[in-house]
Amino acid sequence: MSVRVRFAPSNTGTLHMGGARTALFNYLYAKNKGGTFILRIEDTDRERSKEEYTESIVEALDWLGMEPDEGPILQTSRLGMYNERIEKLLEEGHAYRCYCTPEELEEQREKALAEGRKPKYSRKWRDRTDYPEDQPYTVRIKMPLEGTITIDDMVQGEVTVDVDQLDDFIIMRSDGTPTYNFVVVVDDADMDVTHVIRGDDHLNNTFRQVPVYRALGLEPPTFGHLPLISGLSKRKGSAAVQDYRDRGFLSEAVVNYISRLGWSHGDQEIFTREELVEYFGFDSVGKSPSNFDEDKLKWVNTEWLKKLEASDLAQRLLPFLKKLDLDVELDDRLVQIADLMRDRGDTLVEIAEKSTYFFTDQFDYDEKAVKKWMKPVSEPAIKEIIESLEGLDEWSADSIGTIYREVGKKHEVGLAKLAQPTRISLTGSTSSPSVFDLVASFPREEALRRLRKGAELFGDDE
């Protein structure tokens, strides 16, 4: 049997981390088994569904590297098929018309609550045929009246529910639109879905859907209900996936991090996409909820920042630099700078913000740093370094380092007393990569211009 899974979000909002984790587990399972990953958009909520959300979901999956093999498929394009199935159930006696008014249903509900019972529909119209004419009605499924329903869940194990806890739920509203627990069954069956992998908040729905499969003469798929993720809030986790992209997280890091929310492979923390596909399986998916920890996500992101090729990192850093209105292009210098700065921030945004001095000299000098390091004892050596750099044959970190060491030794000045004034001159502060790499990252004339300007900051010893 060829594995076919689906990710079926509604287009009433953007894709957040919880939904992305569900999509990822579907994707990884399909790819691990050589199967098919389907994207279906459940857009039957006419008031809240928006095309812009569909586009956002597709964009998010594309950024995460989870392009569907089929889809996106819209439920609204399949309404005729749902109606055909409902008529079939009515004809075969597996469903019935219910003419209860909203007021009657509310009265039944209040009575059940007053008597300490779980509110359930009374099944008033289940076996009647004296249908009134020209009256609005809903269509309800005939649930089994006795026994139990058991599913062998890939995550939760064997779960059983007594049918006494279920009622004849509505499969078609009075306005003629089908309901979720009906259309999802029809869609999954029609698309030959073999495994339904979703959050465990859908577990109760599964026990309503299984009788629908059987009423339609279909075999239910295999189910896997994932524990939900705790710690999600408007600020963390439930924001759109694109928000994490725009905050400078790498797609590889996001995929890597959410893969570990409920799944593990020994003690390994960092996974390539190929490793995730190879190792993924439901025998290593836990039953307990996972906690969304943005600090851990940042750590994973820093690990991926270290792994990227410098040219790839530069390409990804470029748009964040441009957002800062910096005049920068993708060239060898940017590749060099990206490589120097890759470990100086948790995200691309942080790295970009800390890299501005490479592309503009519109910065202020750190007054405390100037007072501490721009001392007369260093001035003669710095001026000789500037002169030596002017005539340097090879503009490289190694040759620049040689000059600093030779001049420092000649003037008996420690490297720190030369490196820190250099950093201040080039960047405005004492925080930067290796000073020799820093100097080499600037075009010679720009480095010399900044060093000469910085030399004017040398003051008198107190």
Image (cartoon, rainbow, N blue to C red):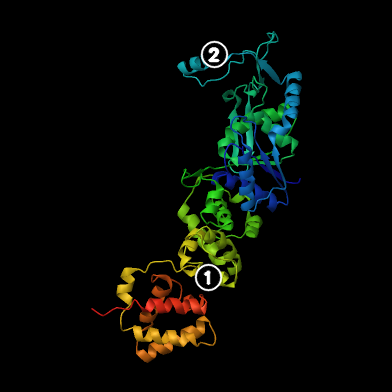
- In the image, 379 versus 301, the foreground residue is 379
The structure residue drawn at horizontal position 46% and vertical position 16%, both measured from the top left corner, is 114
Left or right of 335: which side holds 79?
right
Considering depth in this image, is 28 or 263 the residue closer to the camera? 28
Residue at 47% over, 67% down? 360
Cα–Cα span, label 2 and label 1: 70 Å
Task: Count numbered badges in the picture.
Answer: 2
Proximity of marks 2 and 1: CB atoms separated by less than 8 Å: no
Q: Which residue is mark 2?
A: 103
63 vs 2, left or right, is left
**Res. 246 visible in picture:** yes
Q: Residue at x 72, y 26 (%)?
A: 215
Secondary structure at numbered mark 1 = helix
- Disc 2 crowd rating (10 Å Cα; few below 14, some 14-19, many 20+) is few
Identify the image quadrant of the C terminus: bottom left
What residue is disc 1 on?
A: 337
Using the image as rendered, state which of residue 4 and residue 80 is in the foreground: 80
Question: Residue 204 in the image: x percent, y percent?
Answer: 58, 32
